[in-house]
Amino acid sequence: MLSHKLSIIAATSVLVAACQSPANVKELEVKNSNLQNQLTKAQQEIVGLQTDKKQLMGEISELKRVMGVLDTEKNSRVEESLSLRTEVRQFVQAQVDSLKAFMVASDLLDYVGGELVQRSSAHEGPGVLVDLGNRVPRAGNLSGVAGFFTGPTSLKVYVLRPVDDRYVVIWGSNNLTVAGAGEQRVEFGVSVGIQQGDVIAYDFNGNVNVTFDKGTGATALSSKSLQLGTAISPSSLKNAKEKRAYSLGVFAILK
């Protein structure tokens, strides 16, 4: 009896499995079909992306080619512009040098300073002379220094600009050498712009070797050498009451 029941249960299980199997297969087939469709769609998208990538690479290549052409054209224009500017500067500089040489040879330069004559008193030793009596009357370009010297010497020329109640050192020449006695002129290596009201100072690192008179000028002495960017106070200057006039000045082209 028991074996009979077991046979019935086994047969029933087989029937149930047989009934469910087609449904599971169908469901799997549907899922497989969906996955296949998704795979096909993904493959199509990959193909589309690869096409877009190829197109973009082509556009990038074309842009690089255009940029290369533009760079070549730009460099050509820059080189042409630099060459033209160089030629213009050289031409203008040649004209300026020619005009300056003509004005120097013809003694047409403006002069700012004491008259270049032999004076009664001698200045012993080095000194820093600040000419407050001969301020720059108009803006222009400073070209060199002139003086009536008693012998060889060396000096630096400085431009002082009034700022409030002080004088600020805005420019200084290289060391200039005076070869001998008498009226001498020494040009600067480059011209320097000056403004109305600027004060000229002369820093001698050797004997001044320039004579002076008292009572006719306004040249004072600084107790220390001048440095670019520094400021000096009028109260720090010495011998102002003596009103010294030195045979010393600068020549320039003033407007």
Image (cartoon, grey):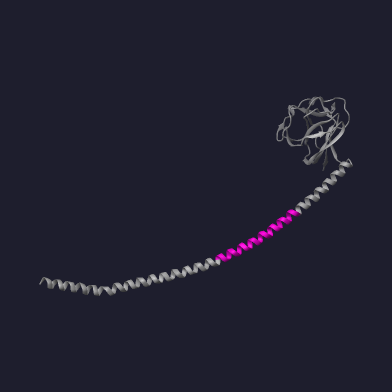
Split into 4 quadrants, where in the image is the C terminus?
A: top right
Q: Position of residue 18 (x, y in %)?
A: 24, 74
In this rendered view, identify the residue nearer to me: 12 or 158. 12
Residue 249 appears in view? yes
- Confirm whether the magenta stretch covers residue 70: yes
Residue displayed at 82% across by 48% down: 94
Spot the residue most to the left: 1
Question: On the image, which quarter does residue 242 sit in?
Answer: top right
Split into 4 quadrants, where in the image is the N terminus?
A: bottom left
- Above-or-below relation of 200 to 83: above
Instruction: Give the extent of the magenta segment.
Output: 56-83
Question: On the image, which quarter does residue 186 sit in?
Answer: top right
Q: Position of residue 73 (x, y in %)?
A: 69, 60
- Magenta stretch, overall SS: helix
- Confirm whether the magenta stretch covers residue 152: no
Q: Position of residue 12 (x, y in %)?
A: 19, 73
Residue 138 appears in view? no
User: Is residue 171 toward the left or the right of residue 21 in the image?
Assistant: right
Question: On the image, which quarter does residue 211 sit in?
Answer: top right
